Amino acid sequence: MKKLWVLGASIIAIIVIVSLITVGMNKKQSNSKHQEREKDTQHSKYITSQTPTLFLHGYAGTLNSEKYMVNQAKKKGATKNVITAIVSNDGQVQLKGKLKKNATNPVVQIVLQNNKQGDYDINAKWFKNVLVKLQSEYKIKKFNFVGHSMGNLSFANYMYLYGDDQSLPQLNKQVNIAGTFNGVLNLNEKVNEISVDKNGKPSRMNQPYQKLLKLKGIYKGKHIEVLNIYSDLQDGTHSDGRVSNSSSKSLKYLLGHSPKSYKESKYEGQKAQHSQLHENSQVANELIEFLWGNKN
């Protein structure tokens, strides 16, 4: 009788142990599948593209001007591969880091050692040098652009000078933040001095705005998508404290109906001050969605 009791207890113990092992394995498999689903969902939020996105700071800007936006893109899983292109005072380009083969949505942070260069044509040539370097090293054919402040005018001059050069990588998408397309307050424009109409045409055209009117023809038929971000402190100046809304919004008239798409996005309040725009989480979220959001 005692032997039968011991045998029964042993059988029950074995059954319990097997049941616990089975439950544990099923739970582990379930958690694994859940993590895989979460991972797939995260990846599906963003496109998978090898087109690099180039960030360019403004006047007196540094790597810090781009760091927050880039880090937000990494944090959200839109990109993992980030390198830096340092442009020397004589326009030589040094790449720090390496773009991995078939990297998803890679980012290139451009740093101009002469960050107070006021000649937009020289800045445009330096930007071209970065593209040529990337083309030589990685055979890139297209690129996206994100610029802040004067970086946008430097890029506009790049497109004016080289936008029709088919031997260079071609622009895919561009994000302009606080663009100085038709002037800078207290430099060549007074507060509330210049206005724009519904088409973005300014009441007065400063240099080099007039020559940039040729951009309409350069952008035409290239299927370029444009996001133009600007801000208003809501203090009566109709500006971000440095650049008037009219100057930023005048990009619309420069491009006309030539881009595949054109969108203006306005931010308001102190967190939208000129230098704070590239530290603004909402701005970062919008540009990440614009550049890499999966519309499917």
Image (tube, grey):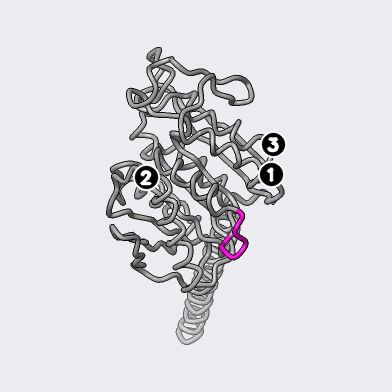
Q: Which of the two marks, 1 or 3, is nearer to us in this view?
A: 3
In this picture, which residue range is highlighted in magenta? 164-169
Find residue 84 and report its image quarter. Answer: bottom left
Amino acid type, mark 2: Asp
Residue 257 - label: 3
Q: Label 1 is placed on what type of residue?
A: Lys
* Mark 3 secondary-structure assignment: loop
In this view, 28 is above or below 7: above
Q: Nearer the viewer, mark 3 or mark 2?
A: 2
Provide the residue designation for mark 1.
Answer: 260
**Extreme residue in the bottom direction:** 3
Residue located farthest toward the right when viewing the structure as drawn: 221
Find out whether residue 166 is within the magenta segment.
Answer: yes
Q: Residue at x 47, y 77 (%)?
A: 13
Residue shown at 45%/38% (left/top)?
177
Dot 3 amino acid type: His
Disc 3 residue crowd, few under 14, some 14–19, many 20+, Cα 10 Å: some
Please state the horizontal and vertical placement of residue 287, each as a whole percent of the image: 51, 43
Q: Earlier in the sequence, mark 3 or mark 2?
A: 2
On residue 119, the disc is 2
Residue appearing at x 48%, y 66% in the figure: 132
Of residues 153 and 235, the one drawn nearer to the viewer in this rendering: 153
Report x, y in % for residue 116: 29, 44
> Measured from the top left, where is residue 188 in percent x and y?
38, 25
Q: Residue at x 65, y 34 (%)?
A: 256
Residue 145 percent coordinates (x, y): 50, 50
Q: Residues within 10 Å of mark 1 (few under 14, many from 20)?
A: some
Taking 226 as reference, is 128 above or below it? below
